[in-house]
């Protein structure tokens, strides 16, 4: 893919300017982002006791589905993290690249998260409100690719909107779960101080709900379905509910921490076995 190949994904069905301005006001978004960064820092601390960072002391971090850089800017502020931010949508990528231009530790790639492969595995892979843009047919393949991009002792940290429980084989059951989740989030907009933000964020949420019902660009799943998908990709997961507290009937915003399952050599695809042995290059993505 070259920079002249214009690709539109999220911007086909979401107002990107509105999204970039107001998405951080989404209920639970800031709490989710804070928890994700804390998990990444803790993983770094844990690994510092187990292996050397070599002469650079740098950590390789990958963000998939970086969008307009709302979460990327938080990663960029971690001084010892070298961040690769991947975004497919041309409109989003233009905003992302502009925002990240002041940060020498961030490299932006316009590429597909389902197939992106760094020259060496990463210590941490992040995804923030992005996985639900992967269509159902591609979800397991995408998660397999996440696994391939992780070091054996790496961690995948996901911030995601997950639906209440539904019957996976029943489209009407899933539609009801989509409506239940988004209508609940819209009901929480009253806590936002700015009336403009309340109105426009509610409109973004309605756009997302309609996209989900149409199975066009938004493919949210329940917590149990997401954990099943991770298991199919040979990853063990630990979900943490960020909000809402005290409700188990509307879904919610979660942070999910996932690790590679220990597999025998025969179980691991040959391309993944070779990827784990590549040396880190300062010029590599």
Image: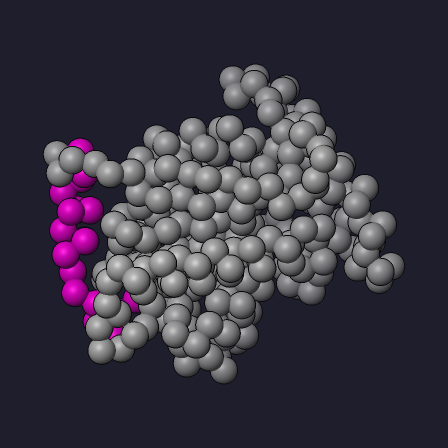
In the image shown, does 38 or 10 lie closer to the viewer?
38
In the rendering, at what x and y percent does residue 62 appear? Answer: 38, 60
- Horizontally, residue 82 falls left or right of residue 8, namely left
Rendered image quadrant of residue 4:
bottom left
Quadrant of the frame with the N terminus: bottom left
Q: Residue at x 65, y 58 (%)?
A: 30
Q: Quadrant of the C terminus?
A: bottom left
Q: In terms of secondary structure, what is the magenta stretch mainly?
A: loop
Q: Is residue 246 magenta?
A: no
Q: Which residues are magenta?
A: 267-285
Of 178 and 160, nearer the camera is 160
Examine the image and state in which quarter residue 33 appears: bottom right
In this orientation, does residue 7 appear?
A: no
User: In the image, what residue occupies the spot 45% across and 33% down?
Assistant: 227
Image location of residue 77, percent across then percent down: 50, 74
In the picture provided, is 64 more to the left or to the right than 268? Answer: right
The residue lying at 75 percent from left, 53 percent from top is 201
Q: Position of residue 169 (x, y in %)?
A: 51, 17
> Looking at the image, how many numbered discs can be counted on the residues?
0
Q: Identify the colour scheme used.
A: one colour
246 or 204, which lies in front? Answer: 246
Say which residue appears at 32% left-offset and 53% top-offset: 154
Give the x, y percent position of residue 12: 58, 50
Q: Does 24 sit above or below residue 223?
A: below
Q: Residue furthest front?
A: 49
Instruction: Tell me if I can see residue 30 in this picture.
Output: yes
């Amino acid at each position: 893919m070259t920079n002249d190949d214009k690709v539109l994904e999220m911007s086909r069905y979401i107002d990107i300017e509105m999204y970039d301005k107001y998405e951080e006001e989404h209920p639970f978004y800031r709490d989710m982002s804070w928890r994700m960064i804390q998990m990444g820092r803790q993983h770094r601390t844990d690994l510092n006791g187990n292996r050397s960072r070599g002469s650079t002391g740098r950590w390789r971090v990958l963000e998939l589905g970086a969008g307009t850089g709302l979460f990327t800017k938080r990663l960029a502020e971690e001084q010892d993290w070298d961040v690769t931010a991947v975004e497919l949508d041309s409109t989003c990528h233009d905003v992302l690249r502009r925002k990240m231009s002041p940060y020498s530790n961030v490299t932006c790639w316009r590429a597909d998260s389902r197939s992106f492969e760094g020259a060496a595995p990463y210590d941490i892979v992040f995804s923030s409100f992005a996985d639900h843009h992967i269509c159902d047919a591609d979800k397991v393949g995408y998660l397999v690719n996440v696994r391939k991009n992780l070091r054996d002792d790496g961690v995948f940290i996901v911030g995601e909107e997950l639906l209440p429980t539904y019957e996976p084989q029943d489209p009407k059951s899933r539609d009801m779960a989509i409506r239940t989740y988004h209508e609940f989030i819209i009901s929480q907009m009253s806590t936002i101080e700015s009336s403009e933000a309340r109105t426009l964020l509610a409109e973004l949420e309605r756009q997302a709900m309609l996209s989900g019902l149409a199975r066009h660009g938004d493919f949210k799943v329940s917590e149990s379905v997401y954990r099943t998908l991770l298991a199919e990709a040979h990853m063990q997961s630990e979900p943490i509910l960020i909000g809402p507290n005290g409700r188990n009937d509307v879904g919610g915003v979660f942070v999910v921490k996932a690790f590679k399952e220990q597999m025998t050599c025969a179980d691991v695809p040959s391309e993944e076995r070779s990827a784990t042995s590549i040396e880190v290059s300062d010029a590599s993505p």
